[in-house]
Amino acid sequence: MNKTLKMLYREDRLARVGILASHTLPTRLFSFYEETWKEYENDGTGEPYSFWLPTYSSGYYDSLEAAEADARIMFPWFAAAVSN
């Protein structure tokens, strides 16, 4: 099972990056993912709807610091992100 250790939001809060720790493997590994907020006017019922859309998932890292470092490279806004 994975556990989100940290969630950081882009300044406009329309994108976020989560840092994960994996607890299912013998060695604890870390990864990160990005999601973007999507809003749609109509899903066929006439009602608007919205959700977090997964847009990126990294590979595994040996340390939390390594995962965060690559997230900062991948997403320039990450350094100025707002913590949840």
Image: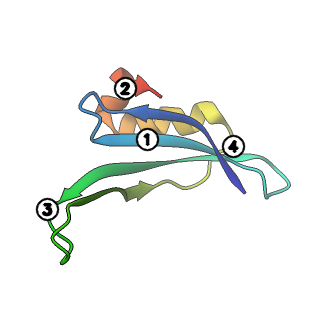
Q: Dots 2 and 1: beta carbons under 8 Å? A: yes
What amino acid type is highlighted by mark number 1? Val
Residue type (three-letter) at the residue carrying disc 2: Ala
SS under mark 4: loop
Residues under numbered marks 1 and 4 in contact, where contact means CB atoms less than 8 Å apart: no
- Residue furthest right in the image: 26
Q: CA distance from mark 2 to mark 1?
A: 9 Å
Please tell me how crowded label 1 is: few (under 14), some (14-19), or many (20+) other residues with Cα within 10 Å: many
Instruction: Quickly name the residue at label 1.
Output: 17
Mark 2–mark 4 distance (CA, rounded to whole Å): 23 Å
Q: Quadrant of residue 15?
A: top left
Q: Residues within 10 Å of mark 2 (few under 14, many from 20)?
A: many
Q: How far is disc 2 from disc 3 in space, using C-alphas? A: 28 Å
Amino acid carrying mark 4 in the image: Asp
Q: What residue is pinned by disc 4?
A: 62
Q: Which residue is mark 2?
A: 81
Q: Position of residue 3 (x, y in %)?
A: 67, 46
Secondary structure at badge 2 equals: loop
The relative height of residue 48 versus residue 19 in the rendered view (above or below) is below
Quarter placement of the N terminus: bottom right
Q: Earlier in the sequence, mark 2 or mark 4?
A: 4
Residue bearing the label numbered 3: 41
Upstream in the sequence, badge 2 or badge 3?
Answer: 3
- Whether tag 2 and tag 3 are in contact, CB under 8 A, the answer is no
Front-most of 7 and 56?
Answer: 7
Q: Position of residue 26 (x, y in %)?
A: 86, 55
Q: Secondary structure at mark 1?
A: strand
Question: Which element type, helix, strand or loop, lies under badge 3?
Answer: loop
